[in-house]
Image (spheres, helix red, strand yellow):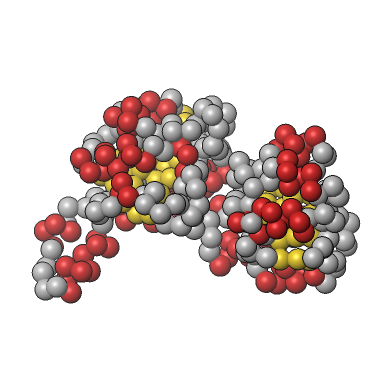
Amino acid sequence: MTADIIITEFLDKDAERFLTNKTSVFRDDQLAFDPDKLCSVAGMARALIIRNRTIIDTRLLDAAPHLAVIGRLGVGLDNIDMAACRDRQITVIPAIGANSDSVAEYVMTAMLVMMRPVWNATTAMIDGTFPRQLMGQGCEIGGKVLAVIGFGGIGRNVARRASAMGMQVMAYDPAFQPEAGLEVIAASLPECLAAADAISLHMPLTDDTRHMINAETISQMKTGAVLINTARGGMIDHVALANSLRSGDLGGAAIDVFIDEPPAKDALDMFRGLDNIWLTPHIAGVTQEATKRVSWMTVEAVAKHLSLG
């Protein structure tokens, strides 16, 4: 099977139909997990449309000599060999901003859940207990300090929502730029970690940010602080995180991204038995609305690049 455009992961059906009305399209959501098959069908493709599970490496690029553009249904690019794409003059188009609202809402939800964990009262209530005193130990987020680690588009979106709910916002970003009308304190990473009641990660995964949250940096955080990661899985040492949650040094954590997705069997065993951890399958930026925005932004950009009209 050959096609002008190959789609390896899910997208909005109407957006896919937009492309099939213009050119030949082959979609198989299992291609992300089968690099051999992807290489075998990519020979005539001028475009690939992918999410984060599809690995774009030199082997695939060599198998796709006509490839001109890669549409990324999302923003992270660590699954793409960008240097190899540049060498081959292949344009990579991420859907910047299209899922920002969904991620920001997830972060705010996670923060509220972890600071006031009434969600785990249901079983006790059904069993006939009435854990009012225990459940009444939660905190309001108004007046609390949020540290946004990485002040790009999504980080700013989170900061706006947190500020509107009465939080004081600090931010660490080597390329920090203030935003008019948004009161944010620029600070170093150690300053942010020491002051924050909640910490939200929004940095790209690089050699510098890999395991930036580890036993040492966790020890710099406030006792009872909440950690949220919607960025990349490699940024956190999960063993150190689990130890801090189990000891009570951290109050809670919400993790939406993992080094391998899906994680290998038993890869998350360090979190077993903890009731202050929220693990979700990389869905912070995946809502009905975000899927439509991401899909349409991507297919329209790819169609324009290929001059499909």
In the rendered image, residue 220, in percent from the top left (x then y), is placed at 31, 28
Q: Quadrant of residue 302?
A: bottom right
In the rendered image, residue 279, in percent from the top left (x then y), is placed at 38, 54
In the rendered image, residue 155, in percent from the top left (x then y), is placed at 51, 43
Q: Is residue 76 above or below residue 11?
A: above
Q: Is residue 159 above or below residue 48?
A: above
Count numbered badges in the picture: 0
Which of the two residues, 27 or 123, is positioned nearer the viewer here?
27
Which of the two residues, 306 or 103, is positioned nearer the viewer here?
306
Q: Tell me, yes or no, if residue 294 can be seen here.
A: no
Residue occupying image coordinates x 31% and y 46%: 270
Which of the two residues, 247 or 191, is positioned nearer the viewer here?
247
Residue occupying image coordinates x 16% and y 68%: 124
In which quadrant is the C terminus drawn?
bottom right
Which of the two residues, 236 or 176, is positioned nearer the viewer here?
236
Query: Could you tell whether 80 is left or right of 206 in the image?
Result: right
Q: Is residue 23 above or below residue 86?
A: below
Query: Could you tell whether 134 is left or right of 82 in the image?
Result: left
Residue occupying image coordinates x 14% and y 57%: 134
Q: Quadrant of residue 120?
A: bottom left
Residue occupying image coordinates x 49% and y 31%: 209
In which quadrant is the N terminus drawn?
bottom right
In the rendered image, residue 289, in percent from the top left (x then y), is placed at 58, 65
Q: Tell me, yes or no, if residue 233 can be seen here.
A: yes
